[in-house]
Each structure stands twice: as C-alpha cells, then as structure tokens.
Amino acid sequence: MKRILSALLTGCLLIGCAPTPTAPPAQPTIYPSRATLTGLWVGAATDPNGITQSVLINFSGEELSLQVEPYTSNWYMTLTQTDQAVVLRARNITVRLVDRLDEIDFSGTFINGALTGTLNWNGTTSEVTFVPIVSVDASQLEKYEGVYRFDSGRALSIIVSPPYEANGLRFFAEGLTFTDFSSGDSRALYAFDERTFAIGALRTIGQPFAGRVQFMTNESGTVTGLQQWDTLDSSATFEHAQRVNFTQEEVTYTSADGTVLAGLVSTPESDSPVPAIVALHGSEPGTRRNFGNKIMAHFMISRGIAILNFDKRGAGDSEGAYRESADTGNLTLLAQDVVAGVELLAAQPAVDATRIGLIGGSQAGWVIPLAATESDLVAYFVIL
C-alpha cells in the first residue's frame, strides 16, 4: 500500500455545472388548498408534555385515521362535518412507552380548501393549520433522485425513501429523503404538488416544516436542478442548485475463489481521471442500491470521487454464500472480494489508479486492513 490518508477531501475534483435555466418555474402556492377533505393532511400540534408533534390525518379509505409521526400506530378517528364546521375525535391506547388513554379532539373549519382550528390533546390545546399532502407517482419521484450543487458549493442528495419500520417506529417518511452534505441534515420531503415539496423537520417528521424545494426541468422534461427556500413564505429568496452529472454502470467481477460479484460503478463527469473508492458493508447482507450505499455514492460523487458499491457475496445478485461470522476464513474471503473490486476500478479509464481507497464501518473495520495489506493498489482507507 503506497500511502494511507486520514481524510477524503484533499485533492477532490469538483464537477462543472450547466447554465441555469433562463426561466425559473412560477412560485408555488404556499399552504396549498384542496377542494375536499379527502386525502392526507399534516399539522403541528402540542402534546401533553408540551412537545411539538407532527400529526397526520388521513381522510382516505374506509376508515379515517390519525397518526403521530414517527409512530406506526393508527388512532381510530371519527369525523363530523356540517357545512364549514369540522369536528374530529381520535383515541389511541397503544402509543409506544405511554401507559395511558390518549384522546385528541379537533374543532375547526374547512373554508376555501384550508383546514384550521383548535386541537385539544388530553387537555393541552394548540392552534393548528393542517396542510394537504399529495401522493406523487413513484416513477416521477425516481426522476428526482440525484446530486445537486448550489452556487455556494453546498451539495445535497435526493433519494426515494425506502419502506422500513421496526419496534413501532417508521425510519423514513414516504416519498423523498433530502440530505444536506454540509450540515448533515437528513429530512423528509412532503409533496405540495408534483414538483414542489415542503422540507420536513426530520427524516421521519414533517411539521414544523423547515422550508421547501421545487424541482426544475428543461423543455424535454429532464430534471436540471432545484430551488430551495428556507421558509414557506412565497416572497422569500431562494437558492438555485444545478443537478450534478454522473454516469452509472452495472458491473460484474470475479473474486479470488471464483465467486462472481455484482456491483455498480458511479463516476462523476470530469476532463481527467478521478480518484475512486470501494464502499464496504458491515456484517449485514448488504446490496449495492440500499439506502446507505445510495447516500455514500451521492456524497462521493459530490466530491468528485468515483465509487464502487456492490452486493455482498450471497446477497442480491452476487454469487457465493452469505455468512455473518467474523472468523478468519470469512473475513479473508470478504477482503478478497474487496481487492477484486479495487482491481476493477483500477481498470476503468475514467479512474486514477493511483488514488483508489476503501471506506466502511462495523465489520468493514476488520475487512479493510486485510484488503489493504493484500493490494498495492489501495492508496488510502477510511474506517467509520
């Protein structure tokens, strides 16, 4: 191994940006209206402990329901609507870690498409404006996935959120996840319309919103960038971010024992060869397109670094048998898989073969040093 670097940010190549479209889209309607109550609404309410909670109300389907993000449990809800007056009552006895009967009563109005009123949660009241959230087709959401860079150099990732929940909690809100690589913020996006999204308070919590984004397209419908506002105020100034161009190639390569592995090479646009890195898995049967690998790929692309993400042996489309064990034999096989990935990257014309590294955490912390000692092509590594 020629050298070990303690950080990835030195000497990275930045990607050039295409010109900003001359005609930005019209300002979105803030707090969009809806002709009927049917559909999903989200609002910020105060719970009995004085904490602001994001409350979802779903007026769709056979049974009306209320949900407090990020809990998965649904509250049974009744609705009484007379002309413009709206009265809701919700009950829940399964809130995680709370041994009590919770009740929420809402009394308000539905006028000109806006649902506003007073919410009473076990005696704690708050004024709430519920905002209608629309469902955007999955094929449209996939078009927004990518890396975006602002004129300031700040970069962010947009990824379709995976469905995942455990122990009564959701780990992702439905739709898109917005990750800012400068601040580390990871937030959900809630759709106002097909192109305009409110930025959630957290990755699984909507209200109170932290701003909004609107995606921009060219005449052919290709997504070219986005605009971000720090508030929902229609008169606020915005920042423009251009979409970063990169290529992705599905690859297969063979490890030392003959096992064929499936991978994905993501390469940022550049006029000269770029540094590259192999992303390792922990002890889980990880795949090349899982959420963590997508985030890691977007981060490296934003820094001008190519990356190989792969299906761990025995997982996804890779051959071999998956084993979680950290015994010497298994770790050695996993290290050989990594070395084969390094050799694949070194053969890529767009990659600088003298600047190939490794990154990973958990079990990868054992595999990385083994792989580094087996290949002179490994120039640096990062253990998380």
Image (spheres, rainbow, N blue to C red):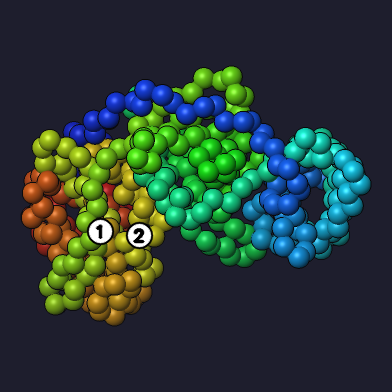
The residue at which mark 2 appears reads as 289
In the rendering, at what x and y percent does residue 3 appear? 12, 45
Q: Residues within 10 Å of mark 1 (few under 14, many from 20)?
A: some
In the rendering, at what x and y percent does residue 381 appear? 22, 50
Q: Residue lying farthest front?
A: 219
Residue appearing at x 12%, y 73% in the figure = 256
Q: Is residue 370 visible?
A: no
The residue at which mark 1 appears reads as 264
Q: Which mark is residue 138?
A: none
Residue 109 sits in quarter? top right
Find numbered disc 1 in the image and state the secondary structure of the residue it sits on. strand
Label 2 amino acid? Arg
Of residues 19 and 344, the one nearer the viewer is 19
Comes first in the chain, label 2 or label 1: 1
Q: Is residue 17 above or below residue 319?
A: above
In the rendering, at what x and y percent does residue 257 appear? 14, 77
Using residue 201 as the reference point, say whether residue 88 is left or right of it: right
Residue 84 sits in quarter? top right
